[in-house]
Image (cartoon, rainbow, N blue to C red):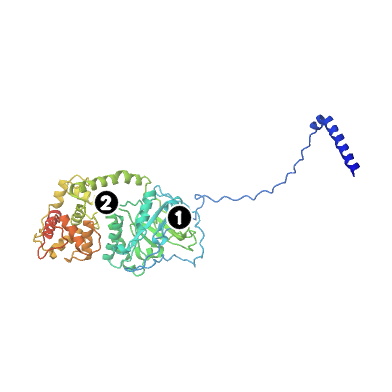
Amino acid sequence: MQELINLLKELIEKLTVFLNQNKAEVDEIKVPKVEEKKVEEKPTPEVQPKPSKSEVVETPQLAPAPTPAPTPEPAPAPEPTPTPESAPTPTPNPSPAPTPATTTIGGISGLIIDVSTHQGVVDWNTAKNHISGAILRCGYGSDQTKQDDKQWARNVSECERLGIPYGVYLYSYAKTEGAARSEAQHALRLLAGHHPQLPVFFDSEQKGTEGIANAASVIFCEAIKAAGYTPGVYASESWFNNNLGNTPYIRWIAKYNANNGQQGKRPNVANVWLWQYTSRGMIPGINGGVDVSVVLDSNAVQYDKTSIAVVSSGVTDKITEAKNYIINHYGAQEVAALQTKLNAKGFGCGTVDGIFGKRTYDALVAFQSASGLTPDGKYGPKTHSALNAVSWNQLKADGIMGPATVRRTQEFFGVNVDGVMGPVTVKALQRWLGVNADGHLGPITIKAWQVKMGTKADGVISTPKSNMVMAWQKYLNAHYKC
């Protein structure tokens, strides 16, 4: 064994010597590169690009149609969607609506959706990138706050904040002309202070209203027009042809065909501005299907994208200036009195709400023009005198809160005049006083009223005569002369 070890040592020493002697030659030895074998890749099949919106002629993406309708008043249930023309059984899981052909309408093109509380809380920051406009439901039926759309305030605020062009619709249940007038007031109450760039629509589709539909649409649309907005009517193809006839207002017609997101056959109605072709459009930012419409007649509505800026920098500035003038000179409570006087003289302000917005401004300008005054919308001394230059019966300041005083109070606040100091009248008073509007004439309300009138604030209306009531009668005589 030892011999073997010695032999190995000897071999190692000889190898070391050999390597040292031939180091230069070893350094020059180049290791040849191994040539890599290329693997030939199979070409990936060519994916055909999706056609652009301009290339798709018969397939608009969103489908407009007023959101499902609420149940009849006063206890509304989920609204029914208008019956589509020749609509087969809907597919359980709708696929996104195909990209539609676009028609430019005075600066607006592409898809227009309509939404209500049925779409829940819309993510408008996301949705705005996929639509060109929206039509918002403000409410349904007669002018009752419980019938305001629960998402109206948020939806209109978001559209205005993000600069999304929007219109408005109100779902009608009107079976009488009086109900139609109330529905117009409903829409106008909610429109106060807002400036939609697209029309305000009368949504006519409720079964049982066929006989009054045409007359109701005229009443509603004329009231909307008188207030300075562009009116329109919404209906399905068959409903329109059977009940509305040759309406002169902007036409928004629903025809779903298969309601599968495809446009299909267009409505058989002349001069249609907007075609609601599906209720199953899929728009990012909205959960579930949504009504989608496409513009057909680009000449029906002239909308200028700059109108938002014009409203902000022009008309709105004048309205704000006029509002500040009346508040600074007469107090905020004078706005409601002004509205009541203008209404009494035939210069309609709609609901007396104490808000100096576009409708009040326009009515005041119209009164000034008719009276030969400078039409600047400011409630100055000359306008004040002209508006109050009417003979009328003053209240007797006797300190008794009798029917005559209550009726004048109701006229002042623009509520139903019946001579009874009921909850509606009390709520109007409470809103004017800035206290909780619960309709109960209790100590808190009375005390606030006494403070307003500058009398002893003990929260009690003395009988049979009250100094506070006497001061109120004098106030009414000084501030309401229509």
Secondary element at image label 2:
loop
In the displayed structure, does residue 322 sit left or right of residue 11? left
Q: Nearer the viewer, residue 272 or 208?
A: 208
**Rendered position, 169 above or below 104:** below
In the displayed structure, does residue 271 sit left or right of residue 223? right
Q: Residues within 10 Å of mark 1 (few under 14, many from 20)?
A: some
Seen as rendered, the residue at the extreme front is: 2
Residue beneath label 1, please? 285
**Residue type at tag 1:** Gly
Secondary element at image label 1:
loop
Q: Nearer the viewer, residue 90 or 299?
A: 90
Q: Which mark is residue 407?
A: none
**Residue type at tag 2:** Gly
In the displayed structure, does residue 420 sit left or right of residue 224? left
In the displayed structure, does residue 58 sit left or right of residue 353? right
Q: Nearer the viewer, residue 35 or 12?
A: 12
Q: Residue 367: image x %, image y %?
A: 19, 50
Label pair 2/1, CB-CB below 8 angstroms: no
Of mark 2 and mark 1, the one earlier in the sequence is: 1
> Distance between the Cα atoms at labels 2 and 1?
31 Å
State which quadrant residue 246 falls in: bottom left
Which quarter of the figure is the N terminus placed in?
top right
Q: Residues within 10 Å of mark 2 (few under 14, many from 20)?
A: some
Q: Residue 474: image x %, image y %?
A: 11, 56
Seen as rendered, the residue at the extreme right is: 3
